[in-house]
Image (tube, grey):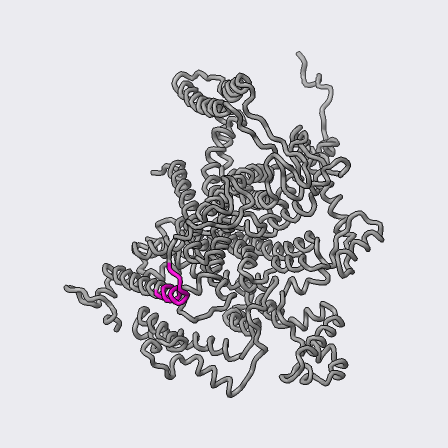
Amino acid sequence: MAEVTLPPRDGFRLSQLLYDARYRSLTIQVVAAMLLMLSLAWLVDNTVQNLAALGKDFSFAFLWTTAGYDINQQIIPFSSQDTHARAALVGILNTLVVAFMGCILATVIGVLAGVLRLSKNFVVSGIMTFYVEAMRNTPLLIWILIVFAVMTEATPQPRDFREGGGASMILWDSVAISNRGVFVPKPVWGEGSGLVLAVFLLSLAAIFILRRVARKRQEQTGQQLPVVRLSLALFFLPTLLVFFVLGRPITLDYPALGGFNFVGGIQIRNSLIALWLALSLYTSAFIAEIVRSGILAVSRGQTEAAFALGMQPNRTMQLVILPQALRVIIPPLISQFLNLTKNSSLALAVGYMDVRSTLGGITINQTGREIEGILLLGTFYLIVSLIISSLMNYYNSGVKLKER
Amino acid sequence: MSGPSSIAFVRRDIIAPAPPPPGQAGVLRWMRENLFSSLTNTLLTLLSVYLIWSVLASVMPWTLNGVWGASSLNECREIRDARGLETAACWAVINERWLQLLFGFYPTDDRLLASVFHAEPLAAAGGLEAVFGAGSNATARIEFVNAMKADLSNLTIFFFGYWRPLLAVVLLVVAVAPILYASLPRGLLWVSLAYPFVAVFLFWGGSVWGPATVALGLVAALYIGRLVSARLGLLAGALAVVAAFFMIFLNPLGVIGHTGLFPLFPHAKGVLDALMPLGLPAIPSDQFGGFMLAIIIGTSGIVLSLPIGILLALGRQSTMPFIRWVCVTFIEVIRGVPLIVWLFVASTLLKYFLPPGSSFDALLRVIILVTLFASAYIAEVVRGGLAALPKGQYEAADSLGLDYWKSMQLIVLPQALKVSIPGIVNTFIGLFKDTTLVVFVGLRDPLGLTNAIRATPEWNGIYWELYIFVALLFFTFCFFMSRYSMYLERKLQTDHR
């Protein structure tokens, strides 16, 4: 039969390789490995031939050549004279920014919607059901395009902000929403602002330590410290004190109308806003479902048991329901964050310059390095997702039910 | 002291039940308990009602007063102003372009339209052959078709001009129904099996013998495999299937420069074409578009990704380290990178990986990548189902003496898949929604078409109407899928709690 194709093994009858369960798995793996090697070799050989036919080589040297294009939304300074590597870095930062902002907003809306959907109030839960179903059953791309269209076509032009133009800035004249983007005040770091920042960070650390000390003390002696009041005081007092003592080193640069556009402040482009809002709204619907099912997963007996122990409702929620619900909620929540990060590559639709548009878009078009560019792009996303999933595994092993 | 006689009153009859006091029954009580039970709840209710009211107050007049008959956005606005309305939707864009949103630039069957609905002008122009025949004037034909389409209603064009995709979708419903609902006659499953070949023929056209011989070849390969496995066992049967497949469809002897009778498939097709040329006009994939494209990519992705995903999940749970390692790598790499990057790989990199000079249909590339992408997600969902199964089930299957595939098929998978239904359907819904991303690799999906429509001078500046239409199309399909998964969950639930 098929023995001829199998690797010979001394000391065995060859048929054992097929019919003996002890050796069969080895046979299958060797055959599979050979097939995999063959097909990989075939792919690599094709690629080498194709590259040779096009007169290309495989190198990453293009990363250190001048990019020659501008990026409109940048966190670190970038000009068209910088390298492709720096352009990729700007893109990566842009991706991470929109993903980070999206995760926060999506969690806030999602938790709210999920909790409200459980409400006994029929009107409220009805609205939330409608919201969740509408978001979950339509493509994300539509939402991105809709928010972008609203932001660009339904918001006033900068010139409408002049006297009698019919538009005005919001939040005490500090934020302007226009069809060129949203303008927000920009902090100006004056002399001594580093000290203020350092004090602020130190007081955050102090709050952290305080909470641990208070907890230890309560566990050992049963005495409680006024943690909330102390934390609030630590949060505000030292920083404000230093801020005023140093003569207000940090000031805000407000956007103001100058010429045909706003000057000053930070311009957040509509593409970023559209992507951010659409990603958050879309993902929040999924998070809402996760939160809802997580809370429902805690059996009613747990609440009743806590009441039977004489716990008050808010302590029950805090000490009994939430820890158990979180164990169910957190893993899918993190994979939603991962989805959001990957979905941010739809930035392409609105022209937001994320890593897909810089490294995977213009850089590839200009240098013709498709293989290298997409390899780097894929590696970036892969690394992000591996980091997030290893964090998730770490968390999972921490909260896993300890069963015998 | 006081005896029984001191009792002043003894009731001897039962009081008729009185109605509960007002506010303790009916709507009032329900409202008090559900809507106004506390201060927060009351506030929430009032806020929600206000929200609903304000949304409806702005959306309803806009929707209901919409303008249906206009040929441009400006005309819409003029009609709106003439009616003295503040806001009005311009549904005219849907009215005019819905065929395009559904089918993209898929060609209509102009011969049928002309000969049935446009007979007199056709006769005046010299008959079917003079207009559409091989030697006809292209410009005159386009003019004739344009005049005919302006004359016919969109509904007529929908039903008769696009009968091929329409018939394919109707048959899809017939083919899917017996899979979805077990109460339908089992004979319909043959329709489901034959459907892929019929659909390919209807959508792409060309010779009927192409799909027919492929189907026959597959049946022949499987039949040979069954014959062999009945005599020589499962492994020999599998090898026979592979060998027969190679002989029929590929040319394994090509590497040694031998081109003769093998592969059989093109020879058989050539002979049958010569004997009996039957077929429809061929339509290349680059003319596919619109919501039809979403249905084609979505359906093929769903159908193909489920078996691959199940195999991957089994591989990931396998006891063989190499197989497990390959499956884990595949799944994690696919899942770690966004679909849009994979589509990009399909459109730009695939040409490097294939032998020099081979070209590949753009739509097929996208379908393959979408399938692989979805199968990695399905694999994770199914793995969850496999992990949720008690170990006793595996051991019970082993102790019955079932081999690996039998135990998977009869014991493990039916239970594991049942658990994973919600996840699988969610993956399918995600896949269907993700078909909109093909716009980035140059296919004309509905969203790409909305951009094209918005770029025309007539409809420049319109967006809500188009997006609402497309969103409703997707919503209908996805909502049906999610409801179906709930129905299936209820039906398959065997624990009586």
Q: Main SS of the magenta segment? A: helix
Residue B434, image x, y percentages: 54, 55
The part of the image, by quadrant, that contains residue B245 is bottom left
Compared with A169, B168 (above or below) is below
Q: Is residue B228 above or below residue A110?
A: below
Extreme residue toward the bottom, this view: B275
Residue placed at 38% from the left, 64% from the top?
Answer: A47
Q: Quadrant of residue A244?
A: top right
Residue A346 locus on image (x, y percent): 54, 51
Task: Kindly give the residue lying farthest to the top in the view shown.
Answer: B1
- Asked if the stretch drawn in magenta spans residue A56, the answer is yes
Q: Residue at x 33, y 76 (%)?
A: B255
Q: Quadrant of residue B477?
A: bottom right
Looking at the rendered image, the quarter that the C terminus of chain A falls into is top left
Q: On the picture, is A329 further left or further right than A187? A: left
Asked if one can make out residue A365 in the rendered structure from this viewpoint, the answer is yes
- Residue A46, x across and y down, in percent: 37, 66
Please identify the quadrant where the N terminus of chain A is shown. bottom left
Confirm whether residue A118 shows in the render: no
Q: Residue furthest left?
A: A11
Q: Which residues are magenta?
A: A45-57
